[in-house]
Amino acid sequence: MIIRSGLLFLAALLLLLAGCSSAPTQPPAVVALPDAIPQATLPPDAVSQQPGVGVIVEPEPTPVVSENRAVIALLDRARLDSGAGQREAAGASLERALRIEPRNAWLWLELAQLRLAQGQYVQAIALAQKSNSFAGRERRLQALNWRVIGNARVAQGNSSGAEQAFKHAAVLEQ
């Protein structure tokens, strides 16, 4: 237990130091354009005029999931556990966070994504729908939920339902 607490403290300290460093930030990722996407659909300044050079993609800002420190700590723990392949522990952390903030749509989305990764497709769909019920006017969140629903339906073999879900997501992303 002491070792785990020490490792958690060390990880938090490293994250704090990384956030405070004055080192130059990494340049945005460069993504190559597939040939199937017509360049006319992209903004004019996003397309390079040089052949073989990709589009610069700016990372989206991370949404504020919660103001509650306990919820943030549980979410961080869940993400670490999930990254380490400990999905049951990640699910337990997310469920504890949801007991603290049961109307937090972002937490419901996180749990839906975890259940999708675990192959629990019916539960992933239900959790994404629950997230949408709390999402209000957050179109980005709603689109992410519809993407989870679409991916779960693909995995279930429901191609028409998946297509509808992805269309919902595309409309919300506009």
Image (cartoon, rainbow, N blue to C red):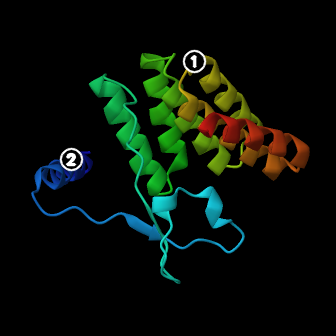
Q: Nearer the viewer, residue 53 or 108?
A: 53
Count neighbours of disc 1 (C-alpha within 10 A) and say few if under 14, some if 14 to 19, many if 20 or more.
Answer: some
Query: Taking 145 as reference, is 7 left or right?
Result: left
- The quadrant in which the N terminus is found is top left
Q: Where's residue 129, x and y in %?
A: 69, 26
Secondary structure of the residue carrying tag 2 is: helix
* Sooner in the amino-acid sequence: mark 1 or mark 2: 2
Q: Nearer the viewer, residue 136 or 37?
A: 37
Residue 158 seen? no
Q: Which residue is mark 1?
A: 134
Residue 159 seen? yes
Residue placed at 24% from the left, 47% from the top?
Answer: 8
Count neighbours of disc 2 (C-alpha within 10 A) and say few if under 14, some if 14 to 19, many if 20 or more.
Answer: few
* C-alpha span from label 1 to label 2: 30 Å
Secondary structure of the residue carrying tag 1 is: helix
Residue 167 drawn above or below residue 41:
above
Please name the amino acid that badge 1 sits on. Phe
Residue placed at 68% from the left, 75% from the top?
Answer: 35
Q: Are marks 1 and 2 in contact (CB under 8 Å)?
A: no
Residue placed at 53% from the left, 56% from the top?
Answer: 43
Q: Where's residue 154, x and y in %?
A: 81, 50
Please name the amino acid that badge 2 sits on. Ala
Q: Where's residue 13, x and y in %?
A: 15, 49
**Count of marks, rendered view:** 2
- The quadrant in which the C terminus is found is top right
Q: Which residue is mark 2?
A: 12
Could you say which quadrant of the image residue 45 lies in? bottom left
Front label number (1 vs 2):
1
Q: Where's residue 39, x and y in %?
A: 62, 66
Could you say which quadrant of the image residue 144 lies in? top right
